[in-house]
Amino acid sequence: MKKSYLYNFFPVKEDEERYAAAAASSAFGPRLQRMLVEIRDVHPPPEIDPRDPWPIKKALNHYEIASGKVIVSFNDTFEHILRYWNFGMATNITVWGRKVAVLVWDVTNEKKPRSYDGSNVYFQMTPSGNCLLTCGEMMNARNMKAEDKIGLCWENKNSCFHIKLFR
């Protein structure tokens, strides 16, 4: 099931008055209300090519290296990660803004993959809508630098992230 945001452009009168009262006390004005919904996807998820299983490829920047957080775009998050998560986990990140602990496998060395988990490995959404995959320990262990290229995918069978460093 695909996840998407549903915006309420025409709230009922009671909600409209409540939003107006909240907006009067806020410096930012009224906020558009949204909720996460599951929609039946007419097309199945794209097949993953076993020779190149990395739907998300990116070059790391200086901020990502310094903070130990990989920025995953809004579109990539919804298309390649959240579509495989259950609705409760997706809601925790997108609606409630919580950090969700995840398991990350560094599969750069395919013969000896290394796992990272614990309190310092999590996935969260930023106010801008992008997501952050925090795994500073892996970045330090691999001695990653700005402009290094990585591949990232959500492995649905084991419910974990796989990351590969291409350099």
Image: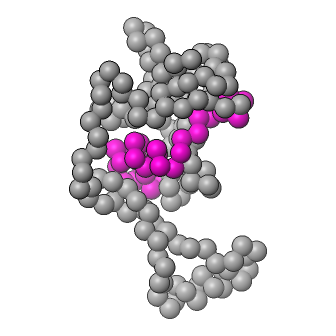
Looking at the image, residue 3 lies above or below residue 64: below
Give the quarter of the image for residue 154: top left
User: Along the line of sight, which residue is nearer the eye, 25 or 76?
Assistant: 76
Q: Farthest bottom residue?
A: 13
Residue 52 image offset from top left, x and y in percent = 36, 24
Q: Vertically, is 23 above or below 117?
A: below
**Residue drawn where x is 43% and y is 68% of the image:** 6
Image check: 51 left or right of 20?
Answer: left
> Measuring 52% from the left and 20% from the top, which residue is drawn there?
165
User: Which color scheme does this rendered protein use?
Assistant: one colour
What segment is highlighted magenta in the picture?
A: 63-92
Q: Position of residue 49 (x, y in %)?
A: 30, 28
Q: Is residue 12 above or below residue 32?
A: below
Q: Quadrant of the C terminus?
A: top right
Q: Quadrant of residue 27?
A: bottom right
Is residue 86 shown in magenta?
yes
